[in-house]
Image: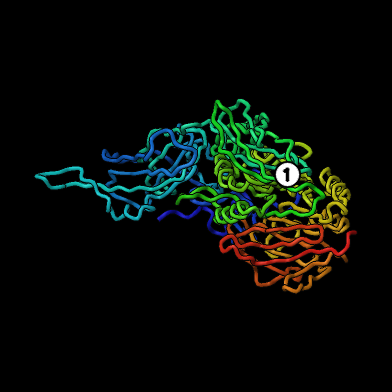
Amino acid sequence: MEASPSISSPVSKLMLILSVCLFFGFSSSLSFLSPAIVNSTLEHRNHTAISNFRVLNRKYLSDCPFRNPFLNISVSKSSDLSDEEFVTVTVTGVLHPSRHDWVAMISPAHSDVSSCPFNGILYAQTGDLSNLPLLCHYPVKAQFMSNDPDYLSCKKKECKKRRNGKCKFTTCGGSIIFHVINIRTDIEFVFFAGGFATPCILSRTQPVNFANPKKPLYGHLSSVDSTGTSMRLTWVSGDKEPQQVEYGDDGKTQTSEVSTFTQENMCSSALPSPAKDFGWHNPGYIHTAVMTGLQPSSTVSYRYGSEAVDWSDKIQFRTPPAGGSDEMKFLAYGDMGKAPRDASTEHYIQPGSLSVVKAMSDEVNNGNVDSVFHIGDISYATGFLVEWDFFLHQITPVASRVSYMTAIGNHERDYVNSGSVYSTPDSGGECGIPYETYFPMPTPSKDRPWYSIEQASVHFTVISTEHDWWLNSEQYKWIQKDLASVDRSKTPWLIFAGHRPMYSSLDGLLSVDKFFVKSVEPLLLKNKVDLVLFGHVHNYERTCSVFRNKCMGIPTKDDNGIDTYDHSNYTAPVHAIIGMAGFSLDKFNKNNATWSLSRVAKFGYLRGHATKQEIQLEFVNADTRKVEDSFRIIRRQID
């Protein structure tokens, strides 16, 4: 039976919080306090995940004391892995199968999976403050051998000794399947006994390489301006030499700019962060190039790479509509992350992400999407850098086909003494550096991740809730200027987006920051913002036309029974919390605020259709594809 996490009791949780506070220091508000103090079901929202697998680094790792001469671990493909495939790992020669037997995939293959007994203080950010030695490098993923239903019952027997034609001694075996993608560095599979609580090493495979570690992969698009005539493509490769994007019928090319980041670029404190230490994985090189001379609302084909390192497949994408034109269709959500496509355990799994990506991919393939807006908590890598590759791979069916615009969230940016508003270790030491490298947005400069963009009849203002938004701060002045500059005759609709919400029915100190609301909400009312989109809370919730916690206006029903907000007589913005795209859902309380009109705790995304006359919004359940909530915002005359 696997041990429970060492902070399972309420007293231990409180002691953990107080201990980590001593290491990290207190912020100027109560924002550091874990939601576990208020509601234990929200334990993992604002801190990196705590699980037996996650605290594996706190366990003593060594070879198991009993050496089994029959034991062997092998992989179905021992070299030249493709960019994506499922490999079978087989263990044979097992004397006594146990439900505590497990296999880890590690990368790079030379990673130290022995113990690091002198580094105990460095890993408090795993959530385990016990005085135990450490595993020096974190596995990419792991599976228990019991995932093979025949393993524990020893149905897969091998005879090891025969006498007089009869088998006198047998061993057991089993096989499990791992989903593998090209992460550039060699991988290796290690067979452990003892579960995640008391592991020891039984055997390991030889390193397995990828056929082309320099392959250009995971291309994703983003808009650079409001014209719809230029699009940025960003991709990952193991090669540092510039590559090209080749696009259009006439084969235009643009050469990539190349960047990367290192362990030294990661944030740390008195306690080195996961990103700085045991969660580090080499990101390779990030290439980005801008395709110019395009036509808005048109279909273009492209490929990226070079003759030296190979080319991607040819892909078709759609340019967004130009700002000031009539119609656009978009999808929006927050808090997606990623989930394994096999039966693995990973340090942080967002169970709804696969179904959401599949549903959105189908919409993109049907030509129903011009742009996507992902408003914070992007990959949930939180200092375990290899997980960015898995996330980029997961969103490729969507992000390689349409403009994929993002906002920064706490799990990308927050860290002690790093300039973030909140001094929590939520980014695991990433401090926004991987995020801004993988997702270059049309922002003023590095670590100023706010921007605006216009597509068709909508002006989108995208902010960072993790950077200073206090009155007269740089970002506040930018918000003030941007909202005031909107030409409503050109873009009649104004949508304001960021990560942390101003409204949520969910209890908890970190659901809503009253100081953020006090500072920024008046700007929304003053500039007649139509719709406000936030994530961070992991469910869907829609408000009335609300300001200062009071309903200033109530929607009426149209002929189809759909809630309709008439902004011809504007009263206040409508807020939608859309953090239901992957992370484990937050259930609603029975007591609902008067401003809360619709609440759905299911995985999905927001679908928007804007013309100059109205915006139609629908919350789509990703599992059933059914519309769970719908509303309209109309304006009979332009202000």
Choose between 80 and 292: the one closer to the eye. Answer: 292
Mark 1 nearby-residue class (10 Å; few <14, some 14–19, many ≥20): many
| Quadrant into which the N terminus falls | bottom left
The reply, left or right, for residue 83 in relation to residue 154 is: right
Q: Position of residue 459 (x, y in %)?
A: 80, 51
Choose between 149 and 616: the one closer to the eye. Answer: 616
The answer to whether residue 244 is above or below residue 397 is above
The answer to whether residue 248 is above or below residue 543 is above
- The amino acid at mark 1 is Ser
Q: Position of residue 353 (x, y in %)?
A: 57, 53
Q: Residue furthest toward the right?
A: 639
Residue on which disc 1 sits: 420
Residue 63 occupies quadrant: top left
Q: Position of residue 273 (x, y in %)?
A: 60, 39
The reply, left or right, for residue 331 in relation to residue 610 is: left
- Residue at horizontal 53 percent and vertical 37 percent from the top: 119
- Residue at horizontal 73 percent and vertical 68 percent from the top: 596
- Residue at horizontal 29 percent and vertical 49 percent from the top: 96
Q: Residue furthest toward the front?
A: 250
Q: Which color scheme does this rendered protein use?
A: rainbow
Q: How many marks?
A: 1
